[in-house]
Amino acid sequence: MQPEILTDNVRTIAYSADMDLPVSTFALLFPAVSLLFLSYTNRFLHLSALIRKLHTDWLGDHDQLIISQIMNLRTRLRLIRLMQFLGALSLLSSVTGMLVRILGSAEIAGGLLVAALGMMVASLLCLAVEIGMSGRALNLVLNALEQDLEQEKREKKAKVV
């Protein structure tokens, strides 16, 4: 079938309903998803250990900084679980697309590939948001450290005078 030319006011797009979609196209997502899952799981495990440590610190010292960190970590954990869920759905969609393509339905397979790519993009966007939150959490700790250092300097100056 010849590609139909669709025109809009902005650009011309070549479209073909018979787009060749080999099964190997779906397999392109497998290495990316595997690496992302490894990264997401490491982030999750690290945050879990940090939450346990903060809980212990909170029991000993009811510091407001710990409360701020815990609230940040709760949101970050939700994002990581969403990232994992979207990654799993992306992989499932890709595998299903391969199966559908093998069974002969290129249109449905193409839709599943687009869905898999969309979920991968959404997962990566969640990762970007989580990385930003991680940076803000570190800034909270660094600001508190700087305030403590400034307080110590003032106390030393007061003792000298």
Image (tube, helix red, strand yellow):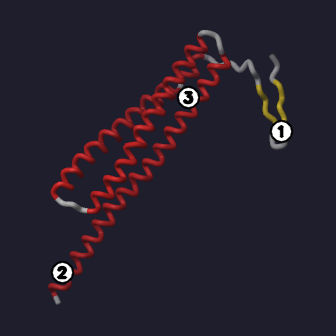
Residue extending furthest toward the bottom = 161
Rate crowding at label 2 as few (under 14), some (14 to 19) or many (20 or more) other CA atoms within 10 Å. Answer: few
> Quadrant location of the N terminus?
top right
Q: Earlier in the sequence, mark 1 or mark 3?
A: 1
Left or right of 159: which side holds 138?
right
Q: Earlier in the sequence, mark 2 or mark 3?
A: 3
Q: Are marks 1 and 3 in contact (CB under 8 Å)?
A: no
Q: Position of residue 29 (x, y in %)?
A: 52, 27
Pick the front one: 119 or 11: 119
Three-letter code for the amino acid on which mark 2 is drawn: Lys
What residue sits 76% from the left and 23% below the top? 16
Q: Is residue 102 above or below residue 52?
A: above
Spatial distance from mark 1 to mark 3, Cα to Cα?
28 Å
Q: Position of residue 159 (x, y in %)?
A: 15, 85
Left or right of 115: which side holds 40?
left
> Quadrant location of the C terminus?
bottom left
Left or right of 136: which side holds 112?
right
The residue tagged 1 is: 8
Q: Is residue 5 above or below residue 52?
A: above
Three-letter code for the amino acid on which mark 3 is drawn: Ala
- Residue 116 is marked as 3
Q: Position of residue 98 (x, y in %)?
A: 56, 17
The residue tagged 2 is: 156
Q: Nearer the viewer, mark 2 or mark 3?
A: 3
Q: Position of residue 123 (x, y in %)?
A: 49, 38
Q: Earlier in the sequence, mark 2 or mark 1?
A: 1
Rate crowding at label 3 as few (under 14), some (14 to 19) or many (20 or more) other CA atoms within 10 Å. Answer: many
- Residue 92 is marked as none
Three-letter code for the amino acid on which mark 1 is drawn: Asp
